[in-house]
Amino acid sequence: MHYYAGIDVGSLATKCAIVDESGNLVSQGIVATGARVVTAVEAALKLAADSGGVDLGSIGFRIATGYGRKRVEADHQVTEITCHAMGAVRLFPGTRTIIDIGGQDTKVIRVSSNGEVENFVMNDKCAAGTGRFLEVMARALEVDVEELGPLALTSEQPQKISSFCTVFGESEVVSHVADGAASADIARGIHESVAHRVTGLVKRVGVMNELTMSGGVARNVGMRTALSAALSTSLNFNDNSQVMGALGAALIAREKHQRGHDSENPK
Amino acid sequence: MSNGYTTLLARCESVVADPMAYVAEWKKANPGGKAIGFLPTYVPLEPIYGAGGLPVGLWGGDVEISIADAYIQQFTCSLVRSVTEYAFTNAYDGLDAVLFPPVCDSLKLVGSIWSYNLAGKFVVEMANLPERVDSPAAVVYLAAELRRVAEKLTGEPLRDEQFQAGIAAVNRLRQAMNGFCDWRRTRNVAMAEVATILRAGTILHSDEYCSLVAEAISDGQQTVEPLRGVPVVVSGLSCQLPHPGMLRCFDEAGLRIADDDLFLGVRGSAPVSSTGNPYTSIAQAYCRSAPMAIRHAEDSQRHVRMLDQIAQSKAKGVVLMVPKFCEPEWFDLRYLREELQQRNIRHIVIDFEEGLGATGSLQTRLSAFAESIS
Ligand code: SF4
């Protein structure tokens, strides 16, 4: 049996997905990226292999993606945009628009029914509308970023965060806290601010159903709720959403290997 | 690459790295000769060469902006901000005059700021180009304007033979730049080198530049080498130049710039006729030149040129490069995108400014674009 691995090196987490010859997701491993990409990649790969009972030697082809892809020893490097597209369509075949909110940037990808990228836009100039914005705001609110989403859902009277700028946004959060606003209401305002920003980006490629969320921030229920409300539509999400990029990379590895295109277009 | 190419590149790199050192060198060899700086994208170079002068293209650079911010808003394009920083920090002091084509609000305003504040350093003059170039009145108007500007810069009317010499020098310069562009399109030349070599064409004296280019492109290699990368057409570079590091990102992303509009203001004019009234001939050539964001004509729209470039180069997509805060390019962007969308031609928009910053996300966008069109 041959297996194929996709390794997605994100700014916060390194994800690994292993698929079999039929393209089924066999297992996955997620570790913190930390300062040493190589160590994180090895750990994610081992975690995925161990949890799926896969012998590392039986992995025929590996593709690296994500911002750290160039530092990974793999057969190919492919951008996360192409990989997220492939992974999202595999997990949710009706996907036509993908919203990937990562730690450093946000991407909106228009995708065809067979997982090909038709268009994409990226917010990469500042931290507004990214996972980093949420992290900084959580710190200002003195809550764990993991708790921020569930906290926002308990809000009754959301507080508006009107600044796109992370630094000014943080000051706004601090002044809401000083004014005695409830943490839940501020948390909801934070998510709505990011949703507002991301909605602008989505509209640049056009809203086409179905919409699927990928990336680490997809796990944040407060973010999914705020985005769904801002876009007036539901969003696909499941427990594998965080490994969508790695899954896409593994599927591309399988495709390349099976087509015998393994020496084509090295990046 | 041939020895001729290596010599051309080395000379161009040194001139682009320090244009004013070259100006000093040229002035030493040509006592009394005037060096006339000019802002992008087009000014008439013929009268400058005709008067025995040296036109020097001012294309800005990756400089930390400090003094310029005291004079112009931060939402001005970074080309204008960087040349202003250079001008106010005495970097252009070797110039005798600077010629502005006030084709956009930024150049209009900053031209006045320069002439008000820097009059003691050099003469600042405007060459007011017509925006619509497809009416006979545009030629009449431009011919009169060119005469006014030329006489202001040179001090006295040029003799006929001087003018003819100037026209011949600039026709040769355009031919050399375009000849180099044709040559490089059939070879794997790094785009950052292409930009440097073309930029030097707006600084080095035409005579030296033309002979260096002629030597470089007569390398005897008739066979066209297999070209690397996914071919794309790049548009939006006629005024502001991207940082060489940005151009390297194209190469690294596996994209090949098969055609472009780099320095089109200088090289895109039709050859100027050596017969008839020289001002009218220059004006006619400008009005028939390649379409750019700064000039408009019903019958030579920019997308027509772009579609032709795509067909000729078999490009798989278009990269629309838009300088930040450049209103002429942003005005054209919507129309160009519509034309491309109607024809299902894949394209991507990249906005840019002087300086490089982090290239990671640019690299990702260009690589993803390459993956999606290959
Ligand atoms: S880049 Fe645009 S705004 Fe700047 S000088 Fe050129 S035309 Fe004007």
Image: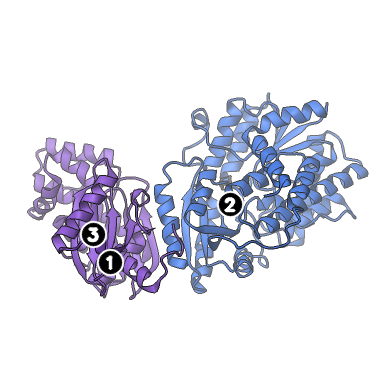
How busy is the neighbourhood of tag 3: few (under 14 within 10 Å), some, or many (20 plus)? some
Depth check: give the residue in front, B236 or B317.
B317
Image point (83%, 54%), residue name: B281
Instruction: Estimate the x, y position of residue B282 in percent, counting from the top left.
Output: 80, 52
Query: The N terminus of chain A lies in which quarter of the figure?
Result: bottom left
Q: Which of the labelled discs sits on residue A87, or is there none? A: 1
Hey, which quadrant is residue A208 in on the image?
bottom left
Give the amino acid at mark 2: Leu
Instruction: Determine contact: label 1, label 3, CB under 8 Å.
Output: no
Hey, which quadrant is residue B56 in on the image?
top right
Secondary structure beneath disc 2?
A: loop
The disc, 1 or 3, on the residue closer to the chain's N-terminal end is: 3
Q: Which residue is mark 2?
A: B237
Give the amino acid at mark 3: Leu
Q: Which residue is mark 3?
A: A56
Q: Is residue B12 visible?
A: yes
Depth check: give the residue in front, B327 or A260.
A260
